[in-house]
Amino acid sequence: MQWITTNVRVVLILWVSVSLARTCAGQDRVAATVHNLSLSGPGKVRAASESQVCVFCHSTHKAMGMRPMWNREASPASYKIYDSSTLDAKPGQPTGVSKLCLSCHDGTIALGSVLSRSDKIRISGGDYMPSGLNNLGTDLSDDHPVSFFYTGGVAASDRQLVDPSALREEIALDETGQLQCTACHDPHRNRYGDFLVLPPENGILCTACHRMDGWNVSSHATSSASVAVARSGNWPYSTVSENACRCCHRPHSAGGPERLMILEREEDNCLSCHDGLVARTNILAELDKFSAHDPRRYHGEHDPAETLAGANAHVECGDCHNPHAAATQPIETDRTPLGATLTYVKGVNVGGAMVQRSQYEYEVCFRCHGDAAVTVRGRAIRQVQESNLRLKFSSGNPSYHPVVAPSPAQSTVSLVPSLAAGSLIRCTDCHNNDTGPRAGGSGPDGPHGSGYEFLLERNYTTRDDTVESDFEYDLCYKCHRRTSILSDQSFPAHRLHVVDRRAPCSACHDPHGISMTQGFGSDHTHLINFDTRIVQPTSVTRTISFRDLGNLAGSCSLVCHGSEHKERTYGTGLP
């Protein structure tokens, strides 16, 4: 009778093994994968003498009562679960088939500890899952979340997840509608490597669930750049587009747990490519310049779910760039409202409202330099002191540089021919790489770093008693013709002030604009907002004021360079 029972058991085990093998083709058979832990297994981890293949997971007798005829105890471990400020799902402790996978992959139960044997099956080289990426441990905070209900509501809340009704058939949720390990992995087939159910190249597996805005035309999805020369990172494939999501993310044992980044520090994931070796742009070199938006100065302060970045002053790559949507920027952008590298980036509009997708470059800048303005050291002390650039550029002001709206000035006679009256400019027309294409160089475009203060593209001297030259006020002369300024076409004493008296442009002009939100006793047309480090109040009235008297005419009351101006008038026929 015992002989019959034993033979029936052997037949049943063989039937299970053959049935499983029939679901696969060629090398996809379980016996040909590293999940074959028997003596004949192809992997480094295998039994010392056991010849059965399926026994390590399945048994027709003495199973623990869980499908599919599970032959292992469930781990009693309590797991640390993945969490993120951008996660809409609610994963809990592992359940279902994920719990079964972890009976090997958390490293707490011996690989040969099966219910159908009174003694453990001995494993060559050690009984437990070896350390490495396959041993997840009990800390799952650095692994893709599992055991959560993938519902239409979760997909709608996230807005970048595929609705579960539209998932590819390979992405199988369990019978309760939960996403488990088997949504990505088929333990019986290893057709694509790592037992994945879809090819990982080109982000095919990831995008089966994650439909990121702008991804299909982004550089990370389309670039053919080779990663062979990369300094660091984890590159399974040869080009950026082939690695796709894997350029930055690792689904298990991620270095940066929240959002599953390969490297712990956010910027390191970017700079491992953008150092001039893989990506066309060498951003790393720009960050070492005198003035820079340097993300390396901050750690753990950025959150993609944050609103006003200035409230917690920092700058990370993700504050200005969406890596899922950023595309190659043409060298000549013809003053487009928003460059391709800034697409699908959050911002603040001119009214102060948060927008999920910026339409204009200045909206990206206003997140830090608007209502929650960061402190900028070394700036001029003005009559009207305002750090909120959103207010300074408002079209309701007496004057402003035309970033948000065309200039209110009726005529600006000094403009260069390429800049017609009524034109709009961008923040990066002034704040940019000093060796970038807009400065005549070959470096990357954008305000990553500059050799000049305030991240300026060209030199802009604010020091008093400066000998005028094309270089000293190069930034101003980019748009305003030097010959026009020095020939007094717009103000009859420009040359007197700038050349003879050596006063910098910034002594009188506030380059952003003057906010009307504060009361003041002076006109502020023509960007007049005196630098009080250079200009002092009059001895009698103790005031500094400018009066606009019409087209190219005005009056000043102030003390500058020891000379007291008492209603000193120009442009009205008087000297």
Image (cartoon, rainbow, N blue to C red):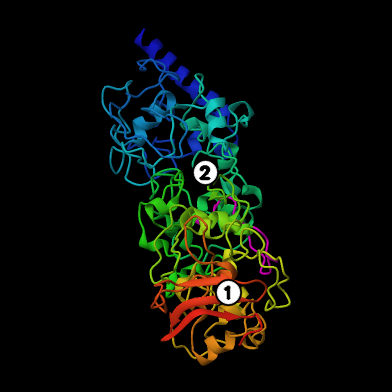
Is residue 529 placed above or below 69 in the rendered structure?
below
Q: Which of pointers 2 and 1 indicates the residue nearer the eye?
A: 1
In contact (CB < 8 Å): disc 2 and disc 1: no
Left or right: residue 569 compared with residue 305: right
| Dot 1: element | loop
From what the image shows, is residue 389 above or below residue 553? above
Mark 1, residue position? 436
Label 2 is placed on what type of residue? Gly
Label 2, secondary structure: give it.
Answer: loop
Label 2 to label 1: alpha-carbon separation: 43 Å
Residue 28: x and y in percent read 55, 37
Q: Is residue 262 visible?
A: no
Q: Is residue 264 above or below residue 154?
A: below
Badge 2, how many Cα within 10 Å: few under 14, some, many 20+? some
Q: Residue furthest front?
A: 540
Which of the labelled discs sits on residue 162, or is there none?
none
Residue annotated with mark 2: 193
Residue positioned 47% across, 29% down in the render: 180
- Which of these two is toward me, 78 or 153? 153
Bounds of the magenta segment: 320-337
Percent across and percent down for residue 68 are 45, 20
